[in-house]
Image (spheres, rainbow, N blue to C red):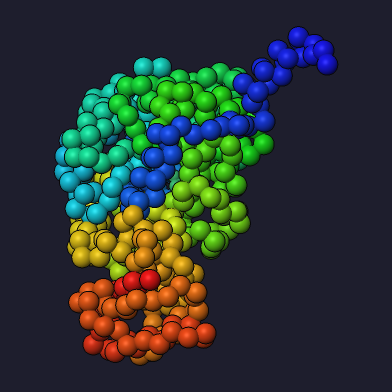
Amino acid sequence: MKINKSFLVLFSVLLLSNSLGAQEGYKPTQENLENRQWFQDAKFGMFVHWGVYSVLGGGGDPGIAEWIMQNKKIPIKQYEKLPSFFNPVDFDAAEWVRMVKDAGMKYITITTKHHDGFAMYDSKISDYNIVDKTPYGKDIIRMLAEECRKQDIKLFFYYSQLDWHHPDYYPRGRTGQGFTGRDESGDWDAYLDYMNGQLTELLTDYGPIGGIWFDGMWDKKDADWKLGTTYQLIHKLQPGALIGSNHHVKPYPGEDFQMFEQDLPGENTTGWQGSHISQLPLEMCLTINGSWGFNLMDQNHKSPKELVHMLVKSAGRNANLLLNVGPMPNGQIQPEHKASLKAMGDWIAENGETIYGTRRGIIAAEDWGVSTQKGKKLYLHILDWDKDVLLVQPFKEKVQSVVFFKDKSKVSHRLDKYGLLLEIPKNKKDGVDTIIEITLK
Ligand code: FHN
């Protein structure tokens, strides 16, 4: 069959620009696949929402403080004054990373640009950034990247595709409408070039990074984001970097992990999650109180027990937990959150073996808790059960031994066609998580 040359050219342009929205036919490199394994083994990371909005601390309102520009309808002209008050003199990258390690976390995902469009790094293609516009004048992303390398913590970059500041983010989406004061015109392709330009900076100037955590596509669901171009660019610059996007729908080709926001995979209390759970590595992100960015009034801090439960429940559903903190404008993490992270670290120091490197176990999650598994070791995490006997659903594998993880003492049990019946005397119960270690044959 004779194929017309111009047809071929058109076809390859279509493939390359991939306006259908994704990197069709994407084959992850070996390095990328290894990083996915690493990611799944790592289980626990810290999410950081930090920007000039932290200066306003939520403005006295409860709720998500990083949205204050939109929620209070602050025009760009006024909002642009904020960077001049942002001077985080107490920021200490070494201390942050140490805190992360002590909490048992293995990576950090930090906002390099949130919806307000302000770059928290030294962007050369826009002076709306921390170095050019704040009295602080230093690139916190660079400092963090260097410290993460020193202390062996991986760094991921959150990048908001949605932008309330850039004039070319046009036509506008659901948010950032008229109040911003932008002209009702703009060049969408120029915006995408700008975004790809910033991503190029982030992927070339900061050493090897763990991945890019996209957010904001939901603002313009039907726009032509030309994801194929962006994803190809990232995978070309750093083939090992993992791409994920918080678009709340089934992952697109080119994405390397799938995330869930404020909900465990399979749950939908927020109403945002699609029902699809992919085969990609999974991650759940969670606020430590009720806000992503620093909110002065938010006292809704989750207890260490609740946080440990979320980590365990995520692991039992094959997902990582990305636990968020919103640093204060002075660069410090608020004391309540430091204390919770320390408590989590203490729990992990004792029980990390039942979490790190595991995958969802053969026993599906139930009301009493979840299971995690690594090879022949199956861990039952009993999180919510006050009776002395627990019947666990039947499974076909044979059991060699059943012990309490904590002291390795034997657990009285019986395995038959009805399941595994476990006796859990009161004195063996743990207030946070009673872990049963089952060795399979
Ligand atoms: O609008 C953002 C929000 O501020 C925050 O960044 C979260 C984190 O998952 N994502 C968006 C809402 O889906």
Q: Position of residue 247 (x, y in %)?
A: 55, 44
Q: Is residue 324 visible?
A: no
On screen, residue 172 above or below 416: above
Q: Position of residue 211 (x, y in %)?
A: 40, 36
Q: Nearer the viewer, residue 244 or 39?
A: 39
Q: Is residue 248 visible?
A: yes
Q: Nearer the viewer, residue 88 or 422?
A: 422
**Corner quadrant of residue 284:** bottom left
Q: Nearer the viewer, residue 314 or 406?
A: 406
Can you name the residue that lies furthest to the front here?
441
State left or right for residue 245 relative to residue 25: left
Q: Residue at x 80, y 11 (%)?
A: 4
State left or right for residue 274 relative to residue 434: right
Q: Residue at x 17, y 46 (%)?
A: 98
Which quarter of the rendering shows the N terminus?
top right
**Corner quadrant of residue 151:** top left
Q: Position of residue 340 (x, y in %)?
A: 24, 60
Which quarter of the rendering shows the C terminus?
bottom left
Q: Nearer the viewer, residue 159 or 243?
A: 243
Q: Position of residue 260 (x, y in %)?
A: 49, 52
On screen, residue 127 above or below 256: above
Say how many tags the image has: 0
State left or right for residue 84 relative to residue 369: left
On screen, residue 153 above or below 374: above
Q: Residue at x 33, y 50 (%)?
A: 42
Can you name the residue that lies furthest to the top here?
5
